[in-house]
Every structure is written in C-alpha cells, then in structure tokens.
Image (cartoon, helix red, strand yellow):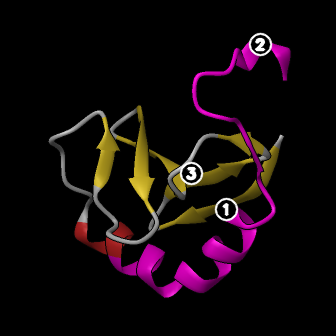
Amino acid sequence: MAKWRGKCAGHEVWINDVDHPPPHCHAVVEGRNKTVDLYTFSIRNPPPDALPPRLRRELKGLQAELLKAWDEVKLIPPGSNTQAW
C-alpha cells in the first residue's frame, strides 16, 4: 500500500505506508524505481542519476503535500528486521 500515490510529469510516484528515514518518495524513471529525497529532490538510490527536469519541478510543486504524507508514514527503526513489519 502507499501513503501517497500519483503521476508527476508522466512518472509513477509514491510514498510507502511503512518506510525508513530520511523523508523520500519513489519514482519510476526510465523503468527503474528511484528513491528521491523530499528536501533536495536528488536521487538517493541508485545514484548518480538526476531527475528529469519536468519531474523535479512537479515534485517541488507538491513538496508540502508529499512532506505531509511522509509525516503519516510508519517508520522502520534503523537496524530492524523489516520482515517483522
């Protein structure tokens, strides 16, 4: 399930219900799941790719909404076994 899901600049974007910090969303770019930092809009994983400019602009426009959704995410504590969730 996703806490937030939508399309931005033609790309699938979502925030998981349960995830690890720091605040981020996921976006499918060129067929690959990219983890995008919600403060810098840089790709955290897998680097060193850059977001397409239009996707970056649209995510920036949704930043407040995305951060609000992130505040509702159940966080996985560092070092925990994610299969227990």
User: In what element is the residue under mark 1?
Assistant: strand
Which residue is labeled 2 in the image?
83
User: In what element is the residue under mark 2?
Assistant: helix
Q: Which residues are magenta?
A: 57-85
Cα gap from disc 2 to disc 1, whole angstroms: 26 Å
Left or right: where 59 falls relative to 49: right
Image coords of residue 6 (percent x, y): 67, 62
Residue 66, compared with residue 14, is above or below; it is: below
Q: Residue at x 66, y 52 (%)?
A: 15
Q: Amino acid at mark 2?
A: Gln
Q: Amino acid at mark 1?
A: Gly
Earlier residue among tags 2 and 1:
1
Image-quadrant location for residue 18 = top right
Left or right: where 69 falls relative to 32: right
Residue 82, compared with residue 74, is above or below; it is: above
Q: Residue 6, labelled with which disc?
A: 1
Cα gap from disc 3 to disc 2, whole angstroms: 25 Å
Q: Residue at x 28, y 59 (%)?
A: 42
Q: Residues within 10 Å of mark 2 (few under 14, many from 20)?
A: few
Q: Amino acid at mark 3?
A: Glu
